[in-house]
Amino acid sequence: MIKIIANDFPNISDYNKQVFHPLQAWEWGEARKKTGVEVLRLGDGKNVYQLTIHQLPITNHRIGYLPRSVFPTKDVLDFLYDYGKKNKIVFIKIEPYEEKSKIKDQRSKTQIKDQKLIKSKHPLFPEWTQILDLNKSEDELLKSFHHKTRYNIRLAEKKGVVIKEMSNDYGFEIFSKLYFETCKRQKYFGHTAKYHKIVWDSLKKDIARILIAFYKDIPLAAYEIFCFKDICYYPYGGTSLEYRNLMASNLLMWEAIKLGKKLGAEKFDMWGSLPPNYEPKHSWSGFTRFKEGYGTKFVEFIGSYDLVINKSAYYLYGLGNKLRENYLKIKSLFFS
């Protein structure tokens, strides 16, 4: 039986034992509520599912988002469909944290073919990521890196780049400055500074950490990483244009990997990537190649699906989203 979990769940650690990704953690849901988004938590006796519900502009319709859970059972999908009908939800985007190669049971294959599920044309997560096995020793990891990556790590160390963990508000301020400078350079229109501060404040106790690369007290690169259960993740990073020849980012990633090992993680998930044999001219090729230098394995997830509840409104939403994409492309031409 599917139940809605109360917002005043008595024991957060008991809740978190039932999830395995930071975007399903209780703390993430609390952060999203602070940004003004409605959060819905469901339990089926075995797993919990944390969704966010988003109001569409100039309408009373809404959309839902279920990120990085297990793939919902048929009972959960049926519950979500009925809930959506009653609450004017157009569709719910579902992006499970399940590897495509591991879907062997007929249950999951049947669910994916559910007539109400449509392969999403607008995924929020890429279908591919890169994952590093942390069960190796540091020497074994270094040997598995691309020779150029190893060279850049040693170069940064030799030139005096220093990595500091600064998982405090001052460290977040440095990270935020570098992150938004990078967004501006790359013409990336993501979340606001206020959003990132709320996420940091909500996750800094147990999940989020800040690492910063310095040269002569000048911050050159900063990462915010998430560590949850036995996996560390690299969702956000920012760099400076100063001293780029010092390869601070290479050393910073190596220290992030070592921190993951120190915290007991067994894997390091790079959060997103192009697939193997990617097109070198693709706009994502740079960071895909950077991550590949650390001896990672390309991993494909089962992808993004939309549970369509209101077909006509879903079609109109698709048109509106296409217009928005074209607007952002035009805006990027003049973004400075």
Image (cartoon, rainbow, N blue to C red):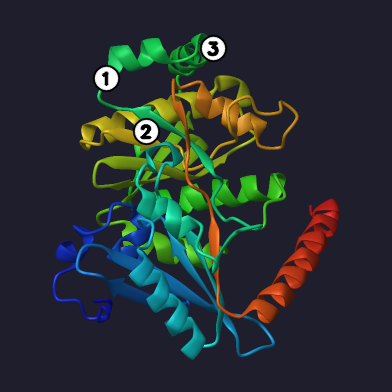
| CA distance for labels 2 and 3 | 18 Å
The quadrant in which the N terminus is found is bottom left
Q: Amino acid at mark 3?
A: Lys
Instruction: Say what secondary structure mark 2 lies in.
Output: helix
The spot of residue 133 in percent (x, y) is 33, 27
Q: Give the residue number, with chain letter if any, for mark 2.
A: 256
Relative placement, left or right, of 157 versus 202 is right
Q: Earlier in the sequence, mark 1 or mark 2?
A: 1
Residue beneath the point at 54% across and 87% down? 88
Q: Earlier in the sequence, mark 2 or mark 3?
A: 3
Q: Which of 133/259 is in front?
A: 133
Relative placement, left or right, of 14 versus 136 is left
Q: Amino acid at mark 2?
A: Ala
Instruction: Say what secondary structure mark 1 lies in.
Output: loop
Q: Amino acid at mark 1?
A: Lys
Question: In which quadrant of the rendered view does residue 311 lie?
Answer: bottom right
Q: How many marks?
A: 3
Q: Which mark is on residue 136?
A: 1
Residue beneath the point at 31% across and 13% down? 140
Q: Vertically, is 244 above or below 129?
A: above
| CA distance for labels 1 and 2 | 15 Å
Relative placement, left or right, of 286 versus 32 is right
Q: Which mark is on residue 148?
A: 3
The answer to the question of whether label 3 and label 1 lie on touching residues, with beta carbons closer than 8 A, is no
The spot of residue 126 in percent (x, y) is 56, 46
